[in-house]
Image (tube, helix red, strand yellow):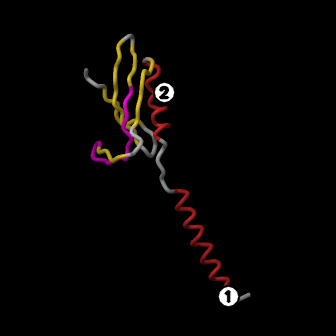
Amino acid sequence: MNWKSFFLGAAVGIVGGYVTKEILTQKTNVSPERVLGAVKKHLQPKGSILGSWIHMEAEPYDKNQMTYIVYKGGISQNTDGNIQQYEFIADAQTGTLLDLIPFST
């Protein structure tokens, strides 16, 4: 066996393994549909959901001196005969609800 071939194969294997590890551990965003479903589930016990929407593109959002990549959306809800509308802001990487802002009408 040629030592040059052995070391070249070992180097290619190490580099390939590193690249594969980086691709697999790369942070990806939660789907906007999944985030919207989680927000609906969070609000469901307080009343029926009448309508909802979500902006499909993630965007930067600053809160408490930190910048998050977020999805923004809205929900209309019937609570005891009153229709309440909310804007929500959720972290795109984890799906965590960061803000739920009631609309004043």
State yes or no: residue 100 in magenta.
no
Pointer 2: residues within 10 angstroms few (<14), some, or many (20+)?
Answer: few
Pointer 1: residues within 10 angstroms few (<14), some, or many (20+)?
Answer: few
- Stretch of the chain drawn in magenta: 63-75
Q: Is residue 30 left or right of residue 87?
A: right
Magenta part, dominant SS: strand
Q: CA distance from mark 1 to mark 2?
A: 61 Å
Would you name the residue on which mark 1 appears? 3
Residue 1 in percent (x, y) is at: 74, 87
> Height in image: 38 above or below 18?
above
Residue at screen point 31% across, 25% down: 102
Q: What amino acid is at disc 2?
A: Lys
> Considering depth in this image, is 69 or 51 the residue closer to the camera?
51
Q: What amino acid is at disc 1?
A: Trp
Would you name the residue on which mark 2 appears? 41
Q: Residue furthest right?
A: 1
Residue at screen point 63% across, 83% down: 7
Q: Residue furthest left?
A: 105
State yes or no: residue 70 in magenta.
yes
**Quarter of the figure with the C terminus:** top left
